[in-house]
């Protein structure tokens, strides 16, 4: 069970963040996930939903669900039960010291443009991280579509600047993977690659996060994804204060 202030609704401006507690909450989250990921079905659900806690961000006036994600706290011994462990060999990471938190299915309603919605989502997450003294935040960060060709330069950028430390680096496990190309980009290509980074991955990297050295082709979800880790100790104090202050 999660503990700490995140169990109580967080209110800021027009938005409210809280932990899902009802079948109606779960139904809304799964419907938003299917819509955000562009799936053919009306709801996205899997066997991990029942084992995770789900955070929702709603508009307080209309009640509309704007953002959702799911989280689970674990240690190295239970890392093989994570969603990411289906796709990545996390043997090395099992030796990481301290509680770890998996963040998954992070999505926004397609029409959402206000960055305050994402800030609210991170504020709730920051409270859980603090409450559990989490040392590593991790998950699978998705790119839309299963064709790696449009993301070749993005992967080259990740290879050049943001690879996980060797002692923690996930190894290949999934049947369909794409190895990152090597080689530096010129300035125009680098700028274009930065613009193609998914917003969630950009947030991780800005705080000192790192990624696997390959992407996984996830055909059921119609995405490519990379394993992404963020060591909490790597986040600057200024950014930590910003996240907590937002909450």
Image (cartoon, rainbow, N blue to C red):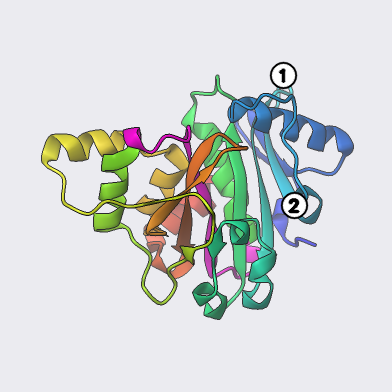
Nearer to us in this view, 245 or 116: 116
User: Which label lies toward us, 2 or 1?
Assistant: 2
Residue 82 lies left or right of residue 27; in this view the side is left
Crowdedness of circle 2 by 10 Å Cα count: few (<14), some, many (20+)?
A: few
Q: Mark 2 or mark 1: which comes first in sequence?
A: 2
Can you say whether 29 is above or below 218 in the image? above
Residue 62 - label: 1
The residue that disc 2 covers is 48
How far across and down, in percent of the image, does residue 91 sit? 54, 74
Question: In the rendered view of the protein, which quadrant contains the N terminus?
Answer: bottom right
Q: Residue placed farthest to the left in the image? A: 186
Q: Residue placed farthest to the right in the image? A: 23
Nearer to us in this view, 162 or 150: 150
Mark 2 and mark 1 in contact? Answer it, CB < 8 Å. no
How far across and down, in percent of the image, does residue 236 sit? 37, 62
Residues at marks 2 and 1, CA–CA distance in whole angstroms: 29 Å
Crowdedness of circle 1 by 10 Å Cα count: few (<14), some, many (20+)?
A: few
Q: Is residue 181 magenta?
A: no
Label 1's element? loop
The quadrant holding residue 165 is bottom left
Can you say whether 61 is above or below 149 in the image? above
- Tell me where the magenta segment starts and ends, as one range: 129-150
Residue 74 appearing in the image: no
The quadrant holding residue 191 is top left
Residue 20 - label: none
Residue 63 appearing in the image: yes
Nearer to us in this view, 56 or 123: 56
How far across and down, in percent of the image, does residue 59 sit? 67, 26
> Which residue appears at 61% of the width and 48% of the height?
104
> Which residue appears at 40% of the width and 63% of the height?
237
Q: Does the magenta stretch include residue 131?
A: yes
Label 2's element? loop
């Amino acid at each position: 069970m999660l503990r700490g202030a995140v169990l109580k609704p967080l209110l800021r401006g027009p938005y409210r963040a809280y932990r899902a507690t009802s079948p109606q909450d779960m139904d809304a989250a799964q419907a938003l996930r299917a819509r955000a990921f562009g799936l053919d079905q009306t709801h996205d659900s899997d066997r991990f939903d029942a084992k995770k806690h789900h955070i929702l961000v709603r508009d307080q006036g209309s009640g509309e669900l704007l953002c959702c994600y799911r989280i689970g706290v674990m240690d190295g011994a239970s890392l093989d039960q994570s969603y990411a462990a289906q796709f990545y060999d996390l043997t090395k990471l099992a030796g990481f010291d301290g509680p770890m938190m998996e963040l998954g299915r992070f999505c926004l309603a397609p029409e959402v443009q206000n960055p305050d919605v994402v800030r609210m989502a991170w504020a709730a997450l920051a409270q859980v991280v603090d409450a559990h003294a989490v040392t590593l935040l991790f998950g699978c960060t998705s790119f839309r579509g299963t064709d790696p060709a449009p993301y070749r330069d993005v992967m080259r950028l990740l290879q050049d600047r943001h690879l996980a430390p060797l002692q923690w680096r996930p190894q290949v496990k999934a049947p369909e993977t794409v190895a990152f190309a090597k080689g530096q980009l010129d300035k125009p290509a680098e700028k274009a690659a930065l613009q193609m980074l998914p917003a969630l991955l950009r947030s991780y990297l800005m705080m000192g996060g790192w990624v696997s050295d390959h992407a996984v082709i996830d055909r059921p979800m119609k995405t490519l994804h990379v394993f992404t880790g963020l060591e909490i100790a790597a986040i600057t104090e200024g950014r930590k204060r910003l996240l907590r202050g937002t909450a």
